[in-house]
Image (tube, rainbow, N blue to C red):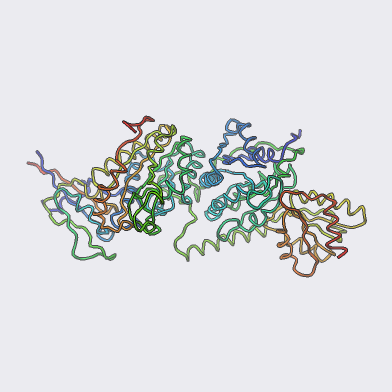
Amino acid sequence: MKELRLMKGNEAVAEGAIRAGADGYFGYPITPQSEVMEYLMAQQPEKRTGMVVLQAESEVAAINMVYGGASTGKKVMTSSSSPGMSLMQEGVSYLAGAELPCLLLNVARGGPGLGTIQPAQADYFQSVKGGGHGDYNLIVLAPSSVQEMFDFAFLGFELAFKYRNPVLILSDGLIGQMMEKVELCEQMPRTTYFDRSWTLTGKPDGQERNIVTSLDLDASRQEIHNQHLQEKYRKCKETEVRYELIDTDDAEYLFVAYGSSARICQKAIQLGRGEGIKIGLLRPITLWPFPAKPLVELAPKMKGILSVEQSAGQMVEDVRLSVGCGVHIEHYGRMGGMIPTPEQVLENLKKLLITK
Amino acid sequence: MAKMKGAIVVDLEKCKGCEVCRVACPNDVIAMAQEVNHKGYHYAYQEHQDACVGCANCAVVCPDGVITVYKVKLSD
Amino acid sequence: MDIKDIIKPENLVYQKTPLMTDKPLSYCPGCGHGTAHRIVMEVIEEMGIQSETIGVAPVGCSVLAYDFMNVDMVGASHGRAPAVATGIKRCWPEKFVYTYQGDGDLAAIGTAETIHAANRGENITIIFINNGIYGMTGGQMAPTTLEGMKTSTSPYGRELKSMGNPLKMTELLAQLPGTCYVTRQSVHSPRNVRRAKKAVRAAFESQKENKGLSLVEIVSNCNSGWKMEPVASNEWMVEHMFPFYPLGDIKVDGKLVNNQ
C-alpha cells in the first residue's frame, strides 16, 4: 500500500534524505528552511538509520563539515537559504574542485543582502554559474512540488555520486513552506561500500594513502584537472538534462519557468486558454544542465517566449543564449519576496508578447 | 660502565644546513661542510669520528629528518 | 672501532619514520614544522594506527602537509580544519582524526571553528603550530604576534592599542569543558622534542578513550619571517616567546593544571 503523508516541502526533503540513506546532515538555522534541521532532529535519524545530524556554528562551518564528511565517501548534505548559501560558496568551490559528492539545498528567499524571508528565485545565477570562485558547475535540480522535494533527495545523492560532484536542490520559500500530499518510498539502506580510489577511510596496510584536495601548485597539472572537470560537465550535459513539457503541442506562446513559478504558470495557461490564447510551458527540472535542446526545438513554433521568474530576469539569459535571435523573448517577474499571481503573469504575456 | 660508540649518516642532498643538529650535539661531533649540496646548502656531517655516543639528539631535532643514527656498546 | 662497523642495520637506533614520505620538506631550513610533522607521524606509527587515521591539512606553510605525512589526508580551506575534522569524525567516530594548523589558520580566520569544535568536545586532536607570524604569505602579523614584534604588516612593531593583543588561544580553549588535554610544547631542542612527542601521544591516547578534544600547541620558530638564522631564531624564541607562551601542560584529564 502506498504511504501517503501531508508534509511541508522542507519536511519532505528531510524525510527523503533519511530514506535515501544519508549518513550526515550539517546545517545552520535560517528562515525559510529551518524546518529541515528541526524535522531531522525530531526524527532522531541516528536511531532510525544511524544518520548523524549536527547543528553547526555557522554556514561556513556547516559546508566544511560537509566537505569533511564527503571526503570519507559518505552521503552528506546541508541546507540553507540565500544569505547562508552565499556564505557557503567557498566551501562549495572546494567540494567541486576536490570532486566530492554531496547534496545542497537552497530554500531561496528575496535578496540582495539580508533581503526578505519570502520566496524568490534570484539565486539562479549563483546556482547555475558556479557560485564560488573558479570554473565549476553544480548539478542543479529545481523542484516545483513537495513530492519533488522528497524525490530529489534520492535523485540528488544518486547524481552526486555518479559524477562525484555537489548537487544543489534550488527550491524557494514557497515550495519549502507549502504543504502537499507526498507519496513516500521505502527506506534505502545506508551504504557500507567505500571506493578506495578516492575516499578517506584510513590508509589500508600495503596500499597507497588517499589525498583529498583542490590544490595543485603546478599550473600545468591544475589545467589538466580543470580539463577533466570540464569533460565531466560535458558528459553531464549530454545525459542529465531533465524537463517537463505542459500543453506545448498546440502552443503558440511558451512560458519557461521553474519551481514555484512553474506552478503559477500552469494556472496562467488555464486562464489564457480560457481566453483562446494557446500557451504552453517548458519547466526545466535541471537548471544546470539547462534544457537548451528542447527549447531550441520548440522555439520556432512559438510567436513568443516568456521567461517567468521571481527575479529581475536571470534564467531569461539562458533562454536567450539557447534560442538565439529568431524568436521574441521577454522576461516577467517580481522581486524581493513578492509572488506574481497567475492573472499578472497572463496580463504580462499579453502586454509583452501580443499587444506590443 | 659500558661505553657507547655511535655514528650518524646524513642524507647530504636533503640536508638544509640549518645547524640545529650541530647545536644539539652534546659532544660537538657535527660540523658543517665547506662544500655545498645540489641545493646550495652547507650540509652537516660527522666531523669527529670517535666522539659520537649515538644519543640521537641530532636526529631527534633535525627538522628534515635527514639523520640516521647507529650505536654499539663497547665492552670494557 | 671503525665507523663502518657501527653503521649496520643491527646497530640502528634512530631513523626517519616510514610514516613520513621521502618527499623533501617544503619548509625553510631549521623550521620547526618538519620536526612537528615527524613526531606526529612517529606517534601514529608507535600506536599502530596508520590505517585508522585521517589527517586534515590547513592553509598556511603546512598547506602541503599531506605531501609529507603518509596517512589519508584532506586539505581544508583556510581556518576550517576543525569543521572538516568534525565532519570526518562524525562520519567515522571510530577513526583517529587530527588537524595540523598554524596560528593564522587556527587563531585568526578559524577562531570560530576552533572554539566550537572544542566546545562541542569533538573527539579530535589539534596540533597547533604557533610561530607568531604568517610565514607562507611573507611574514605578516599574526594573532599571536608578540607586542613590539616587527612583521611586514607591523613594520614598527606590534602596537597593542591599534593592532590588538596577542591571543592565547590555548589557554582560552583550556577553559572550555569540551577539551580534555591541552598543552604547550616546543621542538627546538632534543629534550623538548621528546616532551612534545609524549604530549602528542597523550593527545591521541585521549582521543582513543573518547575523552574530548585534545590540543597540542607547539611554539615554533619562523626564521625566514623573523629574519634570523635558524639557531638564532630558536634562541630568540626561548628568550621572547616562552615568557608570553609558557611551556607545559595546561589541562590534563579534563582538569586545569595549577593556577591556569
Q: Where is residue A300 drawn, in percent x and y?
A: 82, 66
Q: Where is residue C152 drawn, in percent x and y?
A: 37, 59
Q: Where is residue C28 drawn, in percent x and y?
A: 32, 58
The front one of A317 and C69 is A317
Vertical position of residue C180 compared to residue A126: above or below: above
Residue at 61 percent across and 59 percent down: it is A233
Residue at 74 percent across and 62 percent down: it is A319
Q: Residue furthest left?
A: B76
Q: In the rendered image, which quarter contains the C terminus of chain C?
A: top left
**Is residue C181 shown left or right of residue B14?**
right
Examine the image and state in which quarter residue C46 appears: top left
**Is residue C250 shown left or right of residue A116?**
left
Residue at 74 percent across and 42 percent down: it is A147
Vertical position of residue C104 compared to residue C194: above or below: below
Q: Where is residue A281 drawn, in percent x and y?
A: 81, 55
Vertical position of residue C213 compared to residue A63: above or below: above
Query: Is residue C103 visible to us here?
Result: no
Q: How many marks?
A: 0
Q: Residue furthest bottom?
A: A326
Residue at 58 percent across and 47 percent down: it is A102
Query: Is residue A92 visible to us here?
Result: yes
Examine the image and state in which quarter residue A129 appears: bottom right
The front one of C149 and C215 is C149
